[in-house]
Amino acid sequence: MPVRAVIFDFDLTLADSSAAIIECTEYALHQLDAAGATPAQIGAVIGLPLHEMFRSLTGETEPARADAFARHFVARADEIMVHGTRLYPEVPSLLARLREQGLAVAIVSSKFRYRIEAILALNELQSRVDVLIGGEDVQRHKPDPEGLVLALARLGVPARSAIYVGDHAVDAQAAERAGVAFVGAVSGMTSFDGWARAGKQAVVTHLGELDAIVQRMQRDPSEASG
């Protein structure tokens, strides 16, 4: 079945907010006198829900501590995240090309929807995104497919007619569980070779190559199994 919709993760897929996320994480950990984490360690968990980030970075399992971490993170993020996020330069033209091809565009992310909306507004891209599912819109985060399933329902598109694009293994896992074809981004922690070793198709150097992959899928739907 032809591709009708392209769904994107946000952080390290469409945009680089890593410096702001690292600052917010360091701030929240400091407020709790929690174990410190290096920028590289924080970078490796970007895209995970805040509670899971806290557990991964500290090894702590107390829910109240994770809740407090999330509160401190959000408070600092409200101050710096929108203006501290940089869309990748190829993104605006890519979204325009996808829309010109008649494809729906959606975002499914663990990041708060209101924050993504503000970033899109700052970059005048709201009109190029049909559906936006943020962390506050679901009960179960990736790798659970709930966000993807919700986006598909709002788009009115079956899973086999959609592609999910993401930078993290949890994105690939969510796509597989939702029955959606996956394309790896190489702007996060996983390279093209890393995706290939995992048996996943991916852009080679940057996200601007995505529409060529979509066009190949349109010609040969069997490629959508990657």
Image (cartoon, helix red, strand yellow):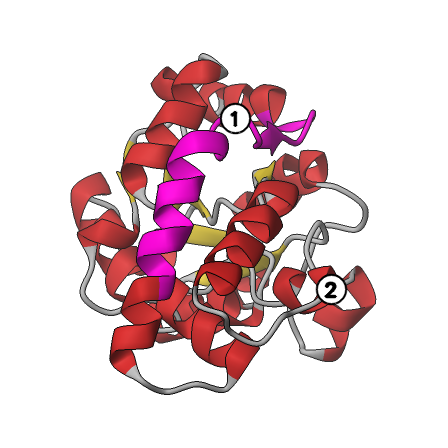
Does residue 77 belong to the magenta stretch? yes
In x, y percent, where is residue 101?
A: 48, 25
Mark carried by residue 1: none
In x, y percent, where is residue 133?
A: 28, 45
Q: Give whichever of discs 1 and 2 has the lower sequence position.
A: 2
The residue located at (65%, 69%) in the rendering is 37
Judge from the rendering whether residue 59 lies leftward or rightward of residue 226; answer left or right: left
Q: In front of the other: label 1 or label 2?
A: 2
The residue located at (68%, 78%) in the rendering is 198
The residue located at (17%, 50%) in the rendering is 153
Residue 130 lies in quadrant: top left
Above or below: residue 139 compared with residue 218: below
Quick one: label 2, few (<14), some, or many (20+) residues within 10 Å? Answer: few
Judge from the rendering whether residue 125 lies leftward or rightward of residue 199; answer left or right: left
Regarding mark 2 in the picture, which secondary structure is present there? helix
Labels 1 & 2 near each other (Cβ < 8 A): no
Judge from the rendering whether residue 39 lies leftward or rightward of residue 58; answer left or right: right
In x, y percent, where is residue 56?
A: 51, 79
Q: Which residue is mark 1?
A: 95
Above or below: residue 217 compared with residue 116: below
Q: Amino acid at mark 1?
A: Leu
What's the magenta region?
69-91
Does residue 95 belong to the magenta stretch? no
Regarding mark 1 in the picture, which secondary structure is present there? helix
Quick one: label 1, few (<14), some, or many (20+) residues within 10 Å? Answer: many
Q: Which residue is mark 2?
A: 40
Give the camera-side residue of 44 and 104.
Answer: 44
Above or below: residue 23 compared with residue 184: above
Is residue 125 at least partly visible in the picture? Answer: yes
The residue located at (62%, 71%) in the rendering is 36
Is residue 109 at least partly visible in the picture? Answer: no
